[in-house]
Amino acid sequence: MSKSSIVTLLSSIRLTPHLPPHSWYIVSSVTLSVLNRPDEIPNVFQYALEKDGGSTQKQLDIARRMREALVKSAAIAGLPKSINALYALKRATPHALLDPLGYSPTARSVELYDVPSSKIMQRGQAFFDQIYGKVSKRVMGQMDQSGTEDLGITARLMYGYILSNTNVLSPVESSFVLLAGLIPQDVNPQLKGHLKGALNNGATVEGVRAVRNVIVCLCEAFGMTRLGENASGGWGWPCLNSKYLLPAMLWSERDDAEYLAFRRGEIANL
């Protein structure tokens, strides 16, 4: 995509109605990373500095927030894409906006070496419970009983040390990172829970819709398509606007019994 085309696209994305403030560039950078387009991330960064980086501190905040979003996306889209995206971002980042070796505003190194692991695991479990609400024990139990308990252990480590750290990105912004990682991958079983989880973390329905629209806009701009009901393959989503996206965002506490049945696969759709 040409520089002028990506700038036009980013300009439109930044002005998306109901999009939570300062979320457009973290959502865009993670989506592009998952789409394997790290080459476009410097364009997001430069446009964010131009439009939202009025002072050196604001520019540093943008750089740190984008880096943290890409780090957190490793939990949902894999470390290789995060590595490539972070290196692409670093090459476009002025030296003054890089954090020196030995310091990070996340304080993860302190948590890793100086904080009891039980405390971090408790924080991660609390974050997981906040996202999944009343079905959290069932979801974690399913991972523990997946054929290897190591799946549940991996999830606990990811939530403990990576996702539940909110020193740079808030819980709701962390949920937006997860949505940006899930939607391009067409992994609807996981997406369903995280759409509701974004609401549990403090997002509004309108805000989640806006974030989802930004992600879909980027995916389509870079070649993904909406597949038909009976499509057997292709790079895109089956029935993008039907079963999986909007209904889960509108779920309410009084629907818990049906929601549990849906997650168990006892009913076909919401």
Image (spheres, rainbow, N blue to C red):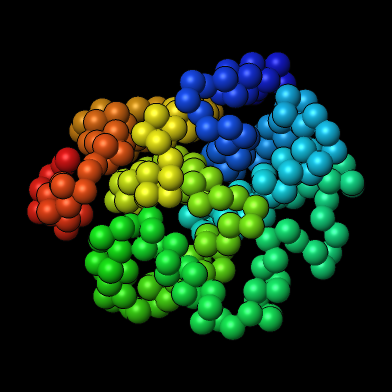
**Quarter-of-image position of residue 225:** top left
Query: Would you say 97 lies left or right of 218 here?
Result: right
In this orientation, does residue 93 appear?
A: no
Query: Would you say 168 lies left or right of 174 here?
Result: right
Q: Using the image, determine if residue 251 lies above or below residue 215.
A: below
Q: Using the image, determine if residue 114 lies above or below residue 216.
A: below
Front residue of this view, candidates 40 and 58: 58
Residue at x 65%, y 74% (from the top left corner) = 111
Front residue of this view, candidates 89 and 63: 63
**Quarter-of-image position of residue 79:** bottom right
Total number of numbered discs in the rendering: 0
x, y percent for residue 87: 74, 50
Which residue lies most toward the left here?
Answer: 266
Residue at x 43%, y 40% (from the top left corner) = 203
Which residue lies most toward the right here?
Answer: 95
x, y percent for residue 25: 63, 35
Q: Quadrant of the C terminus?
A: top left
Residue at x 80%, y 29% (from the top left corner) = 54
x, y percent for residue 149: 35, 79
Query: Would you say 238 lies left or right of 24 here?
Result: left
In this orientation, does residue 120 appear?
A: yes
Q: Quadrant of the N terminus?
A: top right
Front residue of this view, candidates 125 and 146: 125
Residue at x 67%, y 44% (from the top left corner) = 66
Q: Using the image, determine if residue 15 lies above or below residue 145.
A: above
**Quarter-of-image position of residue 128:** bottom left
x, y percent for residue 199: 37, 44
Query: Would you say 148 lies left or right of 247 here?
Result: right
